[in-house]
């Protein structure tokens, strides 16, 4: 395999060798270059000596691609600093607050020890099935080809991890139902559902205020199948206010009622009993689409080890074999679950 970054690394190493040789021997640069070229021909670099460079390059690529494709995760609390031994995350939970006494008359006041706890979650391992690149393709392999191969891996890896993260968050969220007009079901559903309008979002704003959820950094991720009704419910005035705060770079399409709003092809699905559907589960006829609202410090996400595996010159596949792996996890940060809400479609008569 001869990817472009390996060639560039080789050139850089050769240039460094020329500079060092010229400095220590006093030879002209052109003569030093000729000497290095001759030595390189006679004593080639050991096979696989740049593998570490290639792997590191693609590990960085995986991280960058992950955040680019899952922008909503940027608006969650990053617990990565709490990862222990690459697998476990501990989130401290403060104990009870001190009581307040008006016009205290009894002294000395009794000192009470605060008992702190923590919540723990493990990082799950997400890995792709290996892809083989035949020897004939290696002869013309470039960075663009590798980007295409790993792009396929990352597309399914990103989507799976993000889908599972939303399930982990929504599984502990408070369920609220939509109250809009009747809308037609999507493929797989039977019976009409109530739409999710901006008045539902206003009611949710008040609900979060009553729950004492911080008013800053509130977000809502709306299922694209629910967004059409939401946008149509805005009216001209609210639509102008909504679009004024669009931030395409971060995936925010607008802001309303204190929420930064994003959309996604799918967010969550729930049963009539308000159980969040498992990862990969098909949508049943009586299931409901859901959107998700949260405050940034109410949900957590952590990313651990990210790896690219490569097996060069594999005799069984007559070429190279690649696969990727990401360790990731998350949960609702507060043990009481406040600060995150699942907006579930209600049945329409």
Image (spheres, rainbow, N blue to C red):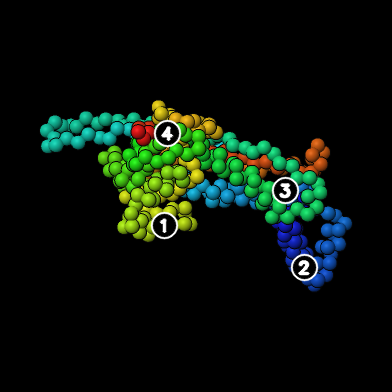
Q: Position of residue 296 (x, y in %)?
A: 40, 45
The residues tagged by marks 3 and 4 sit, at their Cα atoms, a distance apart of: 56 Å
Which residue is at 33% across, 47% downward? 198
Q: Residue at x 70, y 55 (%)?
A: 143
Q: CA distance from mark 4 to mark 2?
A: 80 Å
Where is mark 2, residue-wise?
22
Q: Going from the N terminus, do you reach mark 4 or mark 2 first? A: 2
Mark 3: few, some, or many residues within 10 Å (few <14, many ≥20)? few
Tag shown at residue 191? 4
The answer to whether the residues at label 3 and label 1 have Cβ atoms under 8 Å apart is no
Specify few, some or many for label 2: CA neighbours under 10 Å numbering under 14, 14-19, or 20 or more.
some
Query: How far is the residue under mark 3 from the one under mark 1?
Result: 42 Å
Q: Position of residue 113 (x, y in %)?
A: 30, 30
- Residue 110 occupies quadrant: top left
* Mark pair 2, 1: CA separation: 57 Å
Q: Position of residue 268 (x, y in %)?
A: 46, 37
Which residue has dot 3 on it?
51
State the SS at label 4: loop
Residue 98 vs residue 59, the one in the foreground = 59
In terms of secondary structure, where does tag 3 sit?
Answer: helix
Identify the element where label 2 is drawn.
helix
Q: Nearer the viewer, mark 3 or mark 2?
A: 3
Question: Disc 1 on helix, strand or loop?
Answer: loop
Left or right: where 244 falls relative to 279: left
């Amino acid at each position: 395999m001869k990817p472009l970054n390996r060639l560039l690394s080789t050139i850089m190493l050769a240039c460094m060798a020329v500079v060092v040789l010229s400095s220590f021997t006093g030879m002209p640069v052109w003569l030093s270059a000729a000497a290095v070229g001759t030595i390189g021909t006679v004593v080639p670099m050991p096979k696989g000596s740049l593998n570490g460079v290639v792997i590191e390059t693609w590990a960085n690529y995986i991280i960058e691609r992950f955040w680019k494709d899952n922008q909503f995760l940027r608006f969650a609390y990053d617990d990565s600093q709490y990862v222990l031994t690459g697998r476990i995350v501990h989130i401290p939970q403060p104990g009870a607050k001190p009581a307040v006494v008006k016009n205290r008359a009894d002294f000395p006041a009794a000192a009470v020890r605060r008992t702190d706890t923590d919540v723990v979650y493990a990082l799950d391992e997400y890995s792709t099935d290996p892809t083989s690149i035949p020897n004939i393709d290696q002869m013309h392999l470039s960075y663009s080809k590798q980007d295409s191969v790993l792009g396929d891996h990352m597309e399914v890896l990103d989507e799976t991890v993000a889908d599972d993260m939303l399930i982990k968050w929504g599984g502990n969220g408070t369920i609220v139902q939509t109250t809009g007009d009747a809308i037609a079901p999507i493929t797989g559903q039977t019976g009409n559902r109530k739409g999710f309008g901006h008045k539902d979002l206003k009611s949710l704003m008040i609900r979060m205020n009553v729950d004492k959820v911080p008013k800053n950094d509130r977000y809502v991720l709306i299922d694209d199948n629910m967004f059409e009704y939401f946008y149509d419910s805005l009216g001209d005035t609210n639509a102008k206010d909504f679009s004024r705060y669009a931030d395409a770079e971060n995936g925010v399409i607008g802001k309303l009622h204190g929420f930064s709003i994003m959309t996604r092809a799918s967010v969550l699905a729930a049963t009539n009993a308000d159980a969040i559907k498992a990862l990969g589960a098909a949508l049943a006829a009586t299931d409901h689409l859901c959107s998700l609202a949260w405050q940034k410090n109410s949900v957590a996400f952590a990313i651990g080890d990210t790896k690219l595996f490569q097996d060069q010159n594999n005799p069984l596949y007559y070429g190279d074999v690649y696969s990727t792996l990401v360790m990731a996890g998350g949960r609702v940060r507060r043990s009481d679950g406040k600060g995150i809400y699942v907006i579930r479609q209600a049945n329409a008569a």
